[in-house]
Amino acid sequence: MIILSLIIVVACSEKQELTYVPLISTEEENDTSLLEESENVIRTAFASVVSPEETRYKYDLLIKYLEDHLERPILIIQKQTYDEVNELLKNGEVDLAFICSLSYVIGTEEGYMVDVATTIIDNSDTYRSYIITHKNSGLETLADLKGKRFAFADPYSYTGRLAALEMIDQMGYTANDFFEETFYTYSHDYSVSAVARGAVDGAAVDSILFDMLLDLENEDAMQIQIVQKGPWAGAPPIVVSHKTDENLKTEIKELILSLNENPRGQHILQELKIQEYVPINREKYQPIRDAMKFMGED
């Protein structure tokens, strides 16, 4: 019921204004007030690629590792949308961020973020969009979703929106004239749950996250079928702000890229289900650049 309520809250159309749901309470914000005032703190941003609780839990070990080796406290700043995280990077309000691939392409082309690393998962540093429906829905193709309710993850998500817009364009449609109604969930696993529980008929989701849910035999993911797959593109990266201190940039990058070289780092990677972090190959993000013409479609 919580998930279904969230979907309803963030329902969007041409005539509706998006409503954002805060991710942390006022009490939690007050608990970090002293840390925020410290000049030595490293501010690190997360967008809700997965649900807020899961995002924080998964990366606690990595953040603690960085704190220990950098000998500086790290303040976690979690935002609802990718655009909000990009604004923090642009303004130098965070030093480090875990973002999506489209946000990365936008930020590097505008010059306000710098590469750190991306992931190798299943021997690949790429991922793709999955268009999903409920396995008992009778909806077997993307074309079957015409006139149906559909969930996007975020306006600035490649796998959760932009790739889907490109697939629909290849069929001669825009999202507005293809779907009956569209929604933003601001979380890929919320999108999976929305389809599994009947809040929407279909959704666009991150292949890495969805495959991980299947491996974990997630109850909602087990109710899902993939009806179309988008083109491969560079996986979600870690970046730093263009205003981050140069020495700190170098230290962070070296620590991230060497995680697989020591037992503690190997354990962290295992918990995150990542083989290793590697330098970013910018050429692999070209499919995203090509699809950016659809950014303002709806």
Image (spheres, helix red, strand yellow):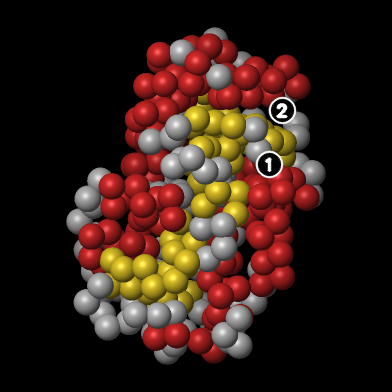
Name the N-terminal-most of marks 1 and 2. 2
Work out how far the residue at label 1 is from the one at label 2, CA to CA, in angstroms: 21 Å
Q: Residue at x 60, y 49 (%)?
A: 234
Q: Which mark is residue 281?
A: 1
User: Which residue in the rendered view is the most extreme toward the front?
Assistant: 123
Residue nearer the viewer, 297 or 23: 297
Q: Where, by quadrant of the figure, is residue 142 drawn?
A: bottom left
Tell me what residue is drawn at x 40 percent, y 50 percent.
209
When the figure is inspected, residue 190 is found, relative to residue 93, above or below; the finding is below
Which residue lies at the image location 58% right of the left edge and 66% below the top edge? 162
Residue 244: mark: 2
The answer to whether residue 171 is seen in the rendering is yes
Three-letter residue code for mark 1: Asn
For badge 2, the amino acid type reads Thr
Horizontally, residue 2 falls left or right of residue 67, namely left
Check if mark 1's residue and mark 2's residue have beta carbons within 8 Å.
no
- Position of residue 274 relative to residue 291, above or below, is above
Query: Quadrant location of the C terminus?
Result: bottom right
Direction from residue 41 to residue 10 in the image, left or right: left
Work out whether residue 54 or residue 84 is closer to the camera in this orientation and state it.
54
The one nearer the camera, 60 or 132, is 132
Say which element carries label 2: loop
